[in-house]
Image (cartoon, rainbow, N blue to C red):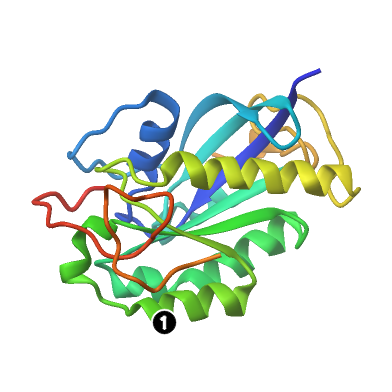
Amino acid sequence: METTLKVIIVGNGGVGKSSMMLRFCKGAYTDTYKKTIGVDFMEKELYVDHSGESVRLMLWDTAGQEEFDTITRSYYRGAAACVIVFSTTDRASFDAVRGWKQKVESEVGSSVAMVLIQNKIDLLDRAEMTVDEAEALATELGLKFFRTSVSQNVLVQEAFQDLAESALDKIGSGQLVPGAEASMGGGVGGAAEAADAPPLSSQPFKLNKPAKVRTGGKKSSCNCG
């Protein structure tokens, strides 16, 4: 029987959440930024090697702007997994990570599987936080940390793969309980009431070795990945 996991993607606006979901689910990329209004939804079937089973990820890309807070918070409920994203070129998005984690856990509980993603590592020449700061934050929050480039398709698949494995491990240990099928907001972790809503390396990163090293990058004219 295929397991269905509800996954929410959170973070400040403009960090690349929508393009990350598009890259992971459809293998596509666009350099045109379009602000998410409320919530976007996609799904992706993923084979998890370590458990030898397929899972269906129901991904919800929630708007990062405060004006959509009432709408998006109702979509958190029932989530089994969460991706917190900040941008290499946006200090405010980095500083907001703690708040996003607290916000998600207040809605779905601390047992939710989480990963922290630093996106746009192809723009490290414009970085607004250091490698040490980013790694220290991940350690402080107890989160697995990935540095991705959606535009270059670096470590996007790996981040979601790791997240799915973590969620399945939590289900196996009883920390998460499979719920109803994840359609418009349900899934592992409980049913969401959507109807109520209107190990890391500090060495320089090289794009040709994404599986081994996670820092550094080459210049890009796009700030959307």
Pick the residue in front: 75 or 205.
Answer: 205
**Residue position marked by numbered label 1 in the rendering:** 133
Residue 79 visible to the viewer: no
The type of residue carrying mark 1 is Glu
> Going by the picture, which residue comes out furthest to the left?
221
Please name whichever residue, 39 or 119, is drawn nearer the observer in this view of the structure.
Answer: 119
Above or below — where is 139 with respect to 160? below
Residue 37 spot, x, y in % from top left? 37, 41
Task: Give residue 154's position: percent from left, percent from top.
Answer: 34, 46
Q: Which residue: 18% across, 53% down?
A: 223
List the single residue furthest toward the right: 174
Q: Secondary structure at mark 1?
A: helix
The number of numbered badges drawn on the structure is: 1
Relative to 35, 162 lies left or right: right
Seen at 44% across and 28% down, the residue is 25
Q: Residue at x 68, y 43 (%)?
A: 165
Horizontally, is 199 left or right of 191 in the view? Answer: left
Left or right of 182 on screen, residue 26? left
- Residue 189 position, x and y percent, is 79, 43
